[in-house]
Image (spheres, helix red, strand yellow):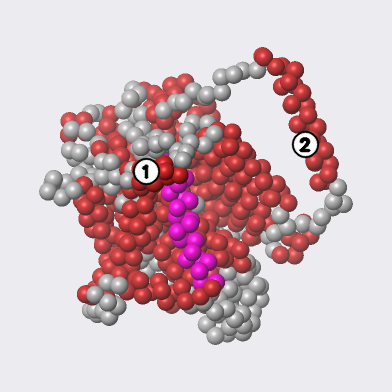
Amino acid sequence: MSLVPPDLIFVILAAVTIIGSILALQAKELIYGAVALAISFIGVAGFFVFLDAPYLAMLQIAIYVGAIVVLILFTVMLVRRGSLDEMTDRAEGGEGTVGLWLAGLLAIGIAGVAALAGPNLPTDTQPASLPVSSLGPVLVTQYPVPLIILALLLSSALLGALILAKVDK
Amino acid sequence: MVALPTTPADILPFVIAIVTSHAFITIVFFPGFIHLMLITMFLTWYERKILARIQLRIGPLYAGGPGGILQPIADGVKLIFKEVMVPYKADKPLFLGIPLALVFLAALPFAVIPFGQNWVIANLDVGIVFVFAVTSLFPAMILLFAWASNSKYPFLGGLRSLFQQVAYEIPMWIATLSVVMLAGSLNLVDIVNAQAKLWFIIPAFLSCVVFFISIMAELERLPFDLPEAEPELVAGWYTESSGAIFMLLFLGLYMKLYLMSSLVTALFLGGWWGPAFLPQPVWFIIKTIFVATLIIIPRGVYPRIRVDMLIRIGWSRLLIIALVNLFVTIFLLSTGILASWGL
Amino acid sequence: MALDPWLAIIIWGVLIIFLTGPLLTLPIFWSRRRPDPFRDMPFESGQVPQGEARTRLVMQYYPYLLMFVVFDVVGMFLFAWGISFNAIPLSESIYVVLFVVLLGAPLGYALHLALHRENW
């Protein structure tokens, strides 16, 4: 990506992700919120591509946008219209200003710390780029135990969900 | 990289350098946009002709040229001028925006499909996973469009479509896993190059069968047609679409057909490898059209399968076959049988 | 001029949107639009639509969606392992095989439910 300065790419991706998630939290119509969430996830996938982890980006899109957003949409459509309107009942409305103040304080804090650290900041901003073929061997040679724990976690989650869905009949 | 123009006299050489660069030719002409549109339109005509012959009729005949070859253009022009009827209280932004998103998602994976040794738009290292990540977004689009139509037929049809497509995605992935293990790479160019001596359909025959059945379910073609069963649901999730919306959906569906057929060609049928008297991309297209014919023909021949049986078959039979095939491939690879075949 | 593949994909995507976008926006100028409450009613084969169109969601296929989410993750992990299958000794790959076999238990239970209950 030598044509476009990396800062511009970062700003665009960050804008897509953050605006998507803000819209997802704020949307009155829950379906629009789910769509905004999907866009935010795609922004995260863009970050993975930007950081030289394309496989992780594809994993993000296929799992989050492809499966979990579908699950969210399905769940939203399950809720009947009446209770939906009750849930989106707005509170006093001061959250926006409080949020902006907090974000401003955070920005000042980070900028202050960065300015004070000055010359001690790390200057090496290029992440090590690994070829995709190195993921597999590392996964099984260095992390076999987390792999098995992951299998147990997934199977227990799936069994639990199946049993719950059965009882709900 | 060419130098950006600094003076007005530099603009013309700059434009010429860009227009004749390999990247531009692949993106716009072949295997890019123009080729994609032409072949998609050809496929719509091709399907109607084949179905017509199976059903002992003739098919499109009058729209210009021999055998009505300009019929897709006539259809397109007609649909542009028709009125787009947005159903009462339907969700307008989603209703109008999702068909465009579907066309976008159906055309996007073509960037990584190689039509020849150098004829690929983007030589991506995670090629096949990119294709699968993009195709996994289709069920969500269909569900949104069905919901946005605010009508019972599309909604029920959309739900059925969603579950059908979701059920057949996993067997598709596991079948491709065998090919990926044989080739040792996710890059589609590498996968096709690994088939220089032996097409993967021979060692991975069961994978090919599973993959083929899965894509017929993904494309919602007979005998997996229930989401658009005409006697039952009118047209399933796209019942309420009309005019330009319908045209975009139609285009997206046939692009998906072309995409899946070219995936079968690239993964199992050796991509562009063939005797040298024809150029490589021509072989690729010939094989892809052959696969598309195999997908189209059952539409005129087989009866429909009921949707809950369909979903059950996807999860129980096909997934088990795909997993068994995975273990078989592991066995074959580890005991070195396949290595002796020249892989 | 070999483009970075992601840049090529982005250019391709933008090109598609710009060239097929007119298919959506041109009909605004060229087709007629007369919203008519009777004609725009949802199509129900001639009957007057009754009730809300978006209710009556079937719950029976919900477990299939859950299975899809889990096996989606499994599939992605398997892809990561599959490309280097030839490069690692079999004794290391056994962990991934164990991974798949461990997930066979809920799969078997789900299929048992699917085949022995008439609802899904």
Q: Nearer the viewer, residue C85 or A92?
A: A92
Q: Where A97 falls versus B87 (above or below)? A: above
Instruction: Tell me which segment is drawn in magenta.
Output: C5-28
**Marks 1/2: CA–CA distance:** 49 Å
What label sits on residue B13 in the rendered view? 1
Residue position marked by numbered label 2 in the rendering: A103
At label 1, which amino acid type do we have?
Answer: Pro
Side of A32 where B312 appears, left or right: left
The chain letter for the residue carrying disc 2 is A
Please tell me whether residue C24 belongs to the stretch shown in magenta. Answer: yes
Residue at image point 57% right, 78% down? C33
Q: Position of residue B32 (x, y in %)?
A: 35, 52
Mark 1 secondary-structure assignment = helix
Mark 2 secondary-structure assignment = helix
Q: Position of residue B276 (x, y in %)?
A: 13, 45
Q: Position of residue A77 (x, y in %)?
A: 63, 60
Q: Nearer the viewer, residue B256 or B342?
A: B256
Residue at image point 31% right, 60% down? B39
Residue at image point 62% right, 70% down? B90
Can residue B166 be seen here?
A: no
Side of B81 where B73 appears, left or right: left
Q: Nearer the viewer, residue C32 or B238?
A: C32
